[in-house]
Image: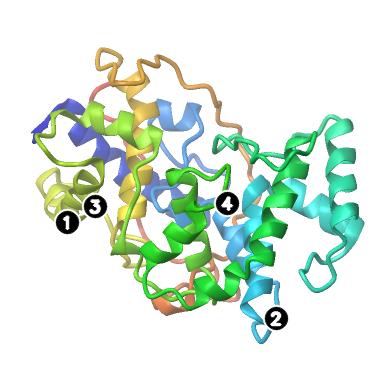
């Protein structure tokens, strides 16, 4: 494989974006970075599980269910939340309907509340993923998604997933449904794997999304015969040596190294970042600007929560934020 200048920027981005996360935990007012691109535009965290929506999923949607309940409750709440992938939509629904559970579901009322939100001018879907409407013959996109979830439950998909022998089998089961392509099926699989429903190693598989494909094309002028997924695994394996080569501090997520899902995520983000940092390297998408502007939010970040089986030593709320003494932000050298 033949790396470009963006290859080194990939590792610098990963290190600085993680440092920003720890700085914000310690000091929400900031500044958290001197990088004008990172401070001016919106980028997801280096680790997918530490992002705001993933944290809400883990701490509120999945932990909000009684862990003694059948797997179908965890599955139902996870997929319903992730279909819309928007905290504001979930909270508006629970405010109007009460706690959302499969056992007490009124599908017609759920459909009406989503339509009411839409008519009031609210965005009910996140812009993070392209969400095609599955073909169930309903007029509204959200109605088709409710029908999709009801079909999954009718097919006893939670039980079949619970019995799956591997993360790839889970992925293939989810991929079977209309309106769910390979990338979305993989994202849902990882989300389900955060919960008590599954217990697979995140490193077992990865699927490169459109953003990651563009990021790979910017980081490498030639990848030989390697598939995008093989490139992502190669990056995962090389992380320690690459951070050391560049003299970058990288503590990982409370000691957890980058997983393939995270390297995939960073490829997606570097696709955007390079539009400003390296405008001469077009990539396969040929996009030239970053759409999402960063808007400062000085609210303290909640104490992070991650799957207990990861064994991360995250401090309790009483102990305050983790004392990781990252150096003061330094402007990157290419500016």
Q: Is residue 17 left or right of residue 280?
A: right
Q: Nearer the viewer, residue 278 or 157?
A: 157
The span from disc 4 to disc 1 (Cα, nearest Å) is 27 Å
To which residue does mark 1 refer? Answer: 237
Q: Is residue 245 left or right of residue 153?
A: left
Q: Are marks 4 and 2 in contact (CB under 8 Å)?
A: no
Q: Quadrant of the N terminus?
A: top left
Neighbours of disc 3 within 10 Å: few (<14), some (14-19), many (20+): some
Q: Are marks 3 and 1 in contact (CB under 8 Å)?
A: no
The answer to which of marks 4 and 2 sits earlier in the sequence is: 4
Give the residue drawn at x 35%, y 29%: 271
Q: Secondary structure at mark 3?
A: loop
To which residue does mark 2 refer? Answer: 66
Q: Residue 79: image x %, image y %? A: 63, 58
To which residue does mark 3 refer? Answer: 249
Q: Nearer the viewer, residue 228 or 61?
A: 228
Image disc number at residue 52: 4
Select label 3 or label 1 by which is in front.
1
Neighbours of disc 2 within 10 Å: few (<14), some (14-19), many (20+): few
Give the residue drawn at x 52%, y 43%: 30
Give the residue drawn at x 83%, y 53%: 93
Give the residue drawn at x 44%, y 44%: 183
Q: Quadrant of residue 252?
A: bottom left
The span from disc 2 to disc 1 (Cα, nearest Å) is 37 Å
The answer to which of marks 4 and 3 sits earlier in the sequence is: 4
The answer to which of marks 3 and 2 sits earlier in the sequence is: 2
The span from disc 4 to disc 2 (Cα, nearest Å) is 22 Å
Neighbours of disc 1 within 10 Å: few (<14), some (14-19), many (20+): some
Q: Residue 313: image x %, image y %? A: 42, 76
* Residue 302 in sight from this viewpoint: no
* Residue 148 in sight from this viewpoint: yes
The answer to which of marks 2 and 1 sits earlier in the sequence is: 2
């Amino acid at each position: 494989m033949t790396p470009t200048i963006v290859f080194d920027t990939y590792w610098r981005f990963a290190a600085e974006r993680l440092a920003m996360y720890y700085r914000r935990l310690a000091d929400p007012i900031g500044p958290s970075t001197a990088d004008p691109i990172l401070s001016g535009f919106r980028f997801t965290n280096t680790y997918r599980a530490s992002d705001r929506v993933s944290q809400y999923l883990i701490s509120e949607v999945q932990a909000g269910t009684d862990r003694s309940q059948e797997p179908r409750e965890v599955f139902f709440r996870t997929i319903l939340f992730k279909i819309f992938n928007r905290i504001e939509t979930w909270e508006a629904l629970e405010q109007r309907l009460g706690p959302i559970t499969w056992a007490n579901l009124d599908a017609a009322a759920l459909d009406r509340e989503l339509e009411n939100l839409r008519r009031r001018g609210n965005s009910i879907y996140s812009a993070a993923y392209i969400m095609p409407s599955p073909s169930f013959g309903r007029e509204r996109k959200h109605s088709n998604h409710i029908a999709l979830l009801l079909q999954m439950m009718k097919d006893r998909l939670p039980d079949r997933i619970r019995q799956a022998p591997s993360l790839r089998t889970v992925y293939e089961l989810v991929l079977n449904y209309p309106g769910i392509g390979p990338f979305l099926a993989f994202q849902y699989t990882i989300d389900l794997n955060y919960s008590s429903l599954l217990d697979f190693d995140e490193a077992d598989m990865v699927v490169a999304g459109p953003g990651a494909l563009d990021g790979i094309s910017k980081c490498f002028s030639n990848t030989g015969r390697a598939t995008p997924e093989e490139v992502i695994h190669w990056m995962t394996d090389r992380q320690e040596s690459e951070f050391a080569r560049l003299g970058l501090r990288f503590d990982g997520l409370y000691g957890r190294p980058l997983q393939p899902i995270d390297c995939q995520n960073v490829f997606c983000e570097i696709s955007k970042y390079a539009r400003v940092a390296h405008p001469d390297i077009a990539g396969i998408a040929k996009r030239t600007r970053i759409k999402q502007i960063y808007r400062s939010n000085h609210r303290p970040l909640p104490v992070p929560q991650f799957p207990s089986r990861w064994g991360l030593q995250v401090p309790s709320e009483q102990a305050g934020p983790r004392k990781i003494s990252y150096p003061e932000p330094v402007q990157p050298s290419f500016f």
